[in-house]
Image (tube, rainbow, N blue to C red):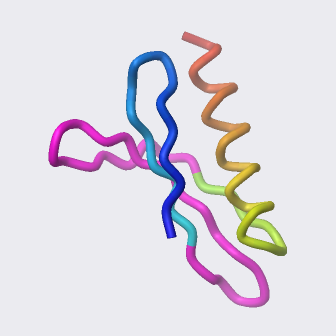
Amino acid sequence: MAKQLELKGRQFWILSEPEGAGWKASVVEVKGTEQEPIGIDATGETRGAADDAAERKLRRLLQAY
C-alpha cells in the first residue's frame, strides 16, 4: 500500500509493509517516472501508526529547509 503526499511542490509516497509483529513505512520522492528513497523509515504496531510516523519525520525534514 502507498500513501501519496504533495509537500512544497514535491511528490512523495509513503510505502508500507508488514514487518515482524508490526509495520514498516518508508518514504520515496517521485520524480517523473523515477522513485528516489530519501532515507526516512518508521515503524509502528499498525500500518497507520507507521505511516503517520514517517509523514511526521518527512514534514520535520522539509521544515528544516
Q: Is residue 7 above or below residue 47?
A: above
Which residue is at 23% across, 37% downward? 31
Span colored in magenta: 17-40
Q: Foreground: 8 or 36? A: 8
Residue at 71% x, 70% y: name it.
Answer: 47
Q: Is residue 1 left or right of residue 55?
A: left
Residue 49 place in picture, x, y as percent: 80, 61
- Magenta part mainly helix, strand or loop? strand
Q: Nearer the viewer, residue 23 or 1?
A: 1
State yes or no: residue 31 in magenta: yes
Asked if 62 appears above or below 29 in the picture, the reply is above
> From the viewer's perspective, is 5 left or right of 60?
left
- Residue 24: say if magenta: yes
Task: Measuring from the top left, give residue 60's x and y in whole percent.
Answer: 69, 26
32 relative to 25 in the view: left or right? left
Residue 13: x percent and y percent? Answer: 45, 49
